[in-house]
Image (spheres, rainbow, N blue to C red):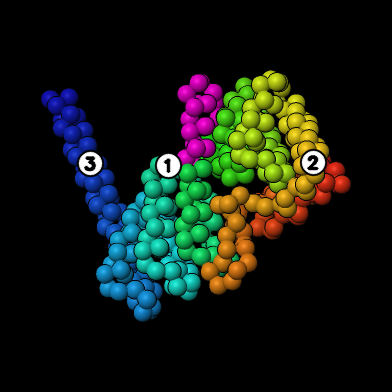
Amino acid sequence: MISENKIKFKIILSLIAFFLILSLAIFTFAAEEDNINEQLAELKDILNSSSAYSAFQTSMLLKSAQNLIESGILFEDIRSIIENSIEESFDAYSVKKVFDVILETQKEGLPTEPLINKINEGFAKNVNKSVLISVISTKAENLKKANEILNEAQQEGLEINGGEEMVKILAYSLENDVPQESLSWLLKTGTTEGKSMEEISEISEELSYLSLLAFDSGLSSEEISLLFKKATENSSNIDEICENIQTSLEAQISTAKIETGETVRPSTTSDSEALPTSSVESTVEIGETPTQEAGEAPTETGSAPEPSTSPTDETPSPPEN
C-alpha cells in the first residue's frame, strides 16, 4: 500500500514538473515573440521615416529582418544596417541582398561578425552598393572555404581548438590570395606539430604578407599558387616554408626584372577589396590590407599599403614572427 502511494506521489510530482516546464516554455516563447514584435515595430518606424521605400518594399525588408532576428543576428546590427542604408540611399533590393548574404552565412553556422564589420566599414566609406554586395559575397565565400579546410582537418581526426576563430583566420588569408591548399597544409601540419592557434595565426598572416608581396610584384594567382605549392613540397618543416617562399619570390622578381626591365606594379589590394565610392572616382578599400613596410606582418587595418619597391630597391624583408 505504501509502495503504491509512493508511486502515485512520484507520478503527481512528475506531472507537476512537466506542466511547470511547459508553462515556462510557453511564457518564454510569448515573451520572445513580444520582443521581436517590438523590434519589428521600431524597424518599421525607421523605414517609414524615409520616402525611398514603398509599402511593399518596407514589408519585404521587415520580413528579411525578422528572419535575421529569429536566426540569432543581433537586433542592433540589423537596425544599424537599415539606418545606414537609408542614409546612403541604398535601394530596398540591395538592402535585402545584404540581409540574404548574412542570413545564409548564419544558417551555415559560420561567423557573421566579419561580414557585419565589412558592411559597416563600407557604409563609413560611402562604398557603392554593388561593390559592397560583391565584397561581402566574396567574404562569405571565403568563410565557406575556410570552414571546408577546418572540416577536412577534423575529418582526419585532428582536434582543432577555437574552430570559429580559426575560420576567421583562414578566411582572412584567403582574401589575401593565399592558396586554399597551402592553408589546408598549414592547419594540418601545424596542428600535428602541436602549434597553438596563435602560432598558426601568425604563420597564416606571414603567408598573407608574402602572397601580397608576390601579387604586387606582378605574379598571377596561378603563379602564386604554384610558388606556394613548391615551397610546401620541398619541406615538411613549417618554419622553413616562409623562407622558401621568400627565396623563390626574390628569384622570380629578379628574373622578371632582367627579362623585361620593367618596374613592378604599385602595391594594391585584390579586386574584391578595392572599392570605388559612389560619389567620386577615387578608390577606397574595405578590409584587412596589410602594410608593406619591412619587418611587419599584415594587420587588419583599413589603411592603404605603401607602394612596392622600385627595381633598384631591395625586396622588403618578411615580418618577424
**Residue type at tag 1:** Gly
Which of disc 3 and disc 1 is earlier in sequence? 3
Which residue does the image show at 14% across and 26% down from the upper left? 4
Tell which of 274 and 89 is nearer to you: 274
19 left or right, relative to 112: left
Dot 1 falls on a residue whose secondary structure is loop
Q: Residue at x 30, y 74 (%)?
A: 54
Q: Which residue is mark 2?
A: 257
**Which residue lies most toward the front here?**
260
Q: Amino acid at mark 3?
A: Phe
Mark sitting on residue 18: 3
Task: Report the quarter where the N terminus lies.
Answer: top left
- For marks 2 and 3, the one nearer the N-term is 3
Q: What's under tag 2, amino acid-wise? A: Lys
Q: Which residue is mark 1?
A: 109
Q: Residue at x 30, y 68 (%)?
A: 57
Where residue 215 sits, quadrant-wise, is top right
Residue drawn at x 22%, y 37% as measured from the top left: 14
Label 2 and label 1: CA atoms lie apart by: 47 Å
Query: Where is residue 24 shown, x and y percent of the image?
Result: 28, 50
In depth, the one of 54 and 253 nearer the eye is 253
